[in-house]
Amino acid sequence: MDVWDNADLILESRAKNRRGHDWLTDLGQVAVPTLVIATAADGPVSTKTCEVVARRLPHGRFLRLDAPFTGVPWLSHPEDIGQIVVDFLAVQALIQLPELDEGT
């Protein structure tokens, strides 16, 4: 799948040097819930790439933020982003609670 924009900028140098390495396939190994946030104003990595990343994560969630959020929403709207993250974590905690209850 060719969804590349500047996504290679986020890769570690060792992975970048491996020709033909599809880092998207490694995402299936991430075992924790992950929130992938993108804005319409993102520059280096497109919202399309972020959405693909979230779909490849076993417990990935994608959230696209439109105006007034900028390409760096945690700087332009820290309270809003903080609440989004807290809400995501709260939902994840509720999802995990039944598993925790089984062991007690």
Image: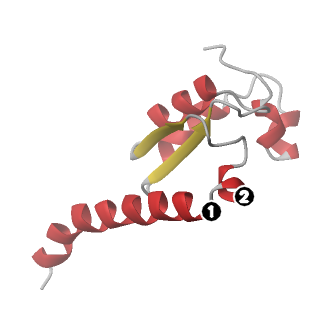
Camera-nearest residue between 86 and 70: 70
Q: Are marks 2 and 1 in contact (CB under 8 Å)?
A: yes
Residue at left 76%, top 22%?
Answer: 5
Q: Report how many numbered discs are placed on residues in the image.
A: 2
**Snapshot quadrant of residue 94:** bottom left
Q: Residue at x 48, y 61 (%)?
A: 85
Left or right for 75, reference 69: right
Graded by Cα atoms within 10 Å as few (under 14), some (14 to 19) or many (20 or more), the crowding at tag 2 reads few
Q: In x, y percent, where is residue 103?
A: 15, 80
From the viewer's perspective, is 95 left or right of 7?
left
For numbered disc 1, what is the local secondary structure?
helix
Q: Which residue is mark 2?
A: 75
Residue at 62%, 62% (x, y): give it: 78
Q: Please state the horizontal and vertical placement of residue 99, each as a whole percent of the image.
A: 18, 68
- Write down the quadrant of residue 6 in the picture: top right
Relative to the observer, which residue lies in front, 104 or 75?
75
Three-letter amino acid code at the position of disc 2: Leu
Residue 55 in percent (x, y) is at 45, 32
The residue tagged 1 is: 78
User: Residue lying furthest top in this view?
Assistant: 2
